[in-house]
Image: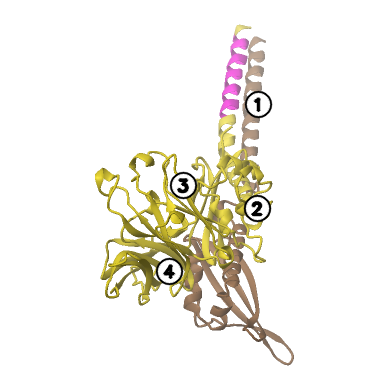
Chain colours: A yellow, B brown
């Protein structure tokens, strides 16, 4: 009787072991399939989301151009340009609302997830140029002899040969006797990249007699088979963020001195002035939009009691004409200049805007940080007549 | 008598073990026949959408018709290279319609100038290749439009 009991017990243990190992082994055998099911599901969600974002105008149709902007007013999300009858043409105003640093209103990641009904998923969106344009240091932007070395490459780092680099040097000149400032431009000869994707641009600037060159900005329009990307390179400042922020919504242009997160204490206390604004449409197509000066009307300051925190002007037809860049001549005291970084050293600098399009991209890593299994969906889109790559990475958020 | 009962118990255990193995192998066997969803690497429908998006984008900017009708094959190759992701290889064949009295023939236009990126052998060895057909009806200028269709067949594969 006891022996029979031992037999059954042994049998029970063996069956238990087989059951346990089966439970572990069988799902592992199907793991690849389960992974594919998971990825397929993610991809379907990503494709549908991307389609909704890029092909839908959203509601209200002009939600990106509303003044004042409130993300609560958006009833349906979409980035497509309502005035375009073609697919994948995006509204620059709506795209600019994805810049979380936009002080004049942006769409929060959590709001966008709710609008897109993506509560269980996380995503990251970038709208970048179809190829990279970088300048190689050192560069010489000190007049009269200017030179820049440019590298053009694909996103995986492979160089792009035969890319045409069209450079426009914009420079501010000041009359020595009156102090009047005006902005001029000179188009450099088009150069092509070598098999390593590198080329050198050089030019000589000579100011008229009695005038002095105060600042230089190089705008590079790089084309590969007529597909263009535009970036700006500066002489006086590497990143204009610390001096002024520039935003453009509809026909309105706003300039303000950044004052958050430690800026007030680092920012010089002197006022800034908007001396002039020009629109860059192409290397030989630059149009003066506004002529300012150093009067109260064009003044900017950041202090608590200041009445001039923002400089805003409406330029009729700005959105319709859709310039690639806006070039501002700002009379300012750059950070770190004179008096312990708080004063002196006033000069007229040229600044390109709106941010961040002067760097070549429109949106960079909007959303969360990718984790776990992710899928990537890419589409080509057109903003302001230029081709960009819209890239979305989607993943499932753990509950 | 007691010994016989013992053997019966052992046989049941062996039967149970054998049954477990049969079920286990059945699951493994069935698993090999299961239709699995495509992996991202070999997904063709996504590549088809991507290919159509790129051709549409070039067409929208009036570049595609210019490249095709002016036979700017180098420019067309460069444009597709920068517009498609770096891990996507492509092979583009362009056909034109030749109408004879009795028949309509498709003739390859870029026969002498293949438009491709990546190793051409990938298209022969890949298990699945995405294919996009895009039609250009003709070329137009400011004053008139000429009906002269070109059929573009873009093959795509992830490298």
Kindly indicate whether the residue at mark 3 contacts the one at mark 4 (C-beta within 8 angstroms).
no
**From the viewer's perspective, is A397 left or right of B99?**
left
Residue farthest toward the bottom in the current orientation of the protein? B101
| Pointer 3 residue | A309
Answer left or right for A240 relative to A382. Answer: left
The residue segment tinted magenta is: A3-21
Residue under the image location 36 percent in, 62 percent down: A233
Q: Nearer the viewer, residue A85 or A203?
A: A203
Q: Quadrant of residue B46?
A: bottom right
Q: From mark 2 to mark 4, how far is it between C-alphas?
A: 31 Å
Instruction: Give the Cα separation between the discs numbered 1 and 3.
Output: 87 Å
Q: Which residue is mark 4?
A: A221
Same chain, labels 4 and 3: yes
Residue at (43, 73) in percent of width and height: A283
Which quarter of the figure is the C terminus of chain A placed in? top right
For this rendering, which residue is in front, A40 or A202? A202
Q: Residue A16 colored magenta?
A: yes
Q: Which mark is residue B15?
A: 1
């Amino acid at each position: 009787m006891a022996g029979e009991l031992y037999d059954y017990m042994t049998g029970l243990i063996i069956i238990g072991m087989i059951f346990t190992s089966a439970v572990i082994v069988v799902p592992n055998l199907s793991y690849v399939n389960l992974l594919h099911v998971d990825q397929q599901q993610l991809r379907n969600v990503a494709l549908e989301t991307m389609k909704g974002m890029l092909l839908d105008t959203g509601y209200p149709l002009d939600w990106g151009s509303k003044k004042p902007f409130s993300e609560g007013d958006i009833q349906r999300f979409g980035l497509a340009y309502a005035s375009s009858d073609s697919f994948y043409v995006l509204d620059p105003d709506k795209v600019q609302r994805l810049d979380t640093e936009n002080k004049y209103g942006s769409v929060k990641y959590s709001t966008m997830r709710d609008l897109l009904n993506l509560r269980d998923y996380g995503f990251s969106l970038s709208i970048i140029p179809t190829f990279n344009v970088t300048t190689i240091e050192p560069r010489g932007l000190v007049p009269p002899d200017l030179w820049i070395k440019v590298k053009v490459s694909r996103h995986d780092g492979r160089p792009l040969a035969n890319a045409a680099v069209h450079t426009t040097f914009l420079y501010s000149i000041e009359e020595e006797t009156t102090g009047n400032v005006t902005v001029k431009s000179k188009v450099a000869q088009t150069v092509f990249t070598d098999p390593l994707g590198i080329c050198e641009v050089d030019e000589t600037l000579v100011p008229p007699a009695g005038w002095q060159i105060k600042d230089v900005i190089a705008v590079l329009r790089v084309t590969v088979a007529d597909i263009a990307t535009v970036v700006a390179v500066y002489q006086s400042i590497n990143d204009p963020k610390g001096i002024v922020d520039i935003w453009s919504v509809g026909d309105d242009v706003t300039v303000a001195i950044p004052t958050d997160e430690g800026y007030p204490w680092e920012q010089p206390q002197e006022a800034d002035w908007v001396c002039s604004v020009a629109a860059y449409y192409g290397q030989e197509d630059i149009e003066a939009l506004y002529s300012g000066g150093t009067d109260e009307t064009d003044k900017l300051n950041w202090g608590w009691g200041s009445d001039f925190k923002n400089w805003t002007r409406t330029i009729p037809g700005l959105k319709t004409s859709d310039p690639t860049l806006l070039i501002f001549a700002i009379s300012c005291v750059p950070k770190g200049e004179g008096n312990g970084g708080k004063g002196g050293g006033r000069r007229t600098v040229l600044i390109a805007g709106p941010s961040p399009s002067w760097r070549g991209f429109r949106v960079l890593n909007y959303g969360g940080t990718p984790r776990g299994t992710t899928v990537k969906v890419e589409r080509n889109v057109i903003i302001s007549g230029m081709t960009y790559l819209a890239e979305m990475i989607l993943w499932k958020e753990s509950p | 008598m007691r010994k016989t009962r013992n053997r019966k118990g052992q046989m049941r255990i062996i039967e149970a073990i054998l049954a477990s193995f049969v079920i286990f192998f059945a699951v493994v066997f069935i698993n090999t026949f299961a239709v699995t969803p495509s992996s991202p690497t070999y997904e063709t429908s996504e590549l088809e959408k991507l290919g159509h998006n790129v051709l549409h984008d070039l067409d929208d900017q009036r570049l595609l018709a210019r490249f095709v009708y002016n036979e700017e094959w180098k420019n067309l190759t460069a444009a597709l290279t920068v517009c498609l992701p770096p891990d996507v290889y492509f092979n583009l064949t362009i056909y034109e319609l030749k109408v004879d009295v009795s028949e309509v023939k498709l003739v390859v236009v870029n026969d002498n100038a293949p438009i491709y990126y990546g190793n051409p052998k990938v298209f022969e060895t890949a298990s699945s290749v995405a294919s996009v057909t895009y039609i250009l009806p003709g070329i137009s200028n400011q004053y008139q439009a000429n009906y002269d269709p070109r059929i573009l067949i873009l093959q795509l594969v992830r490298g």
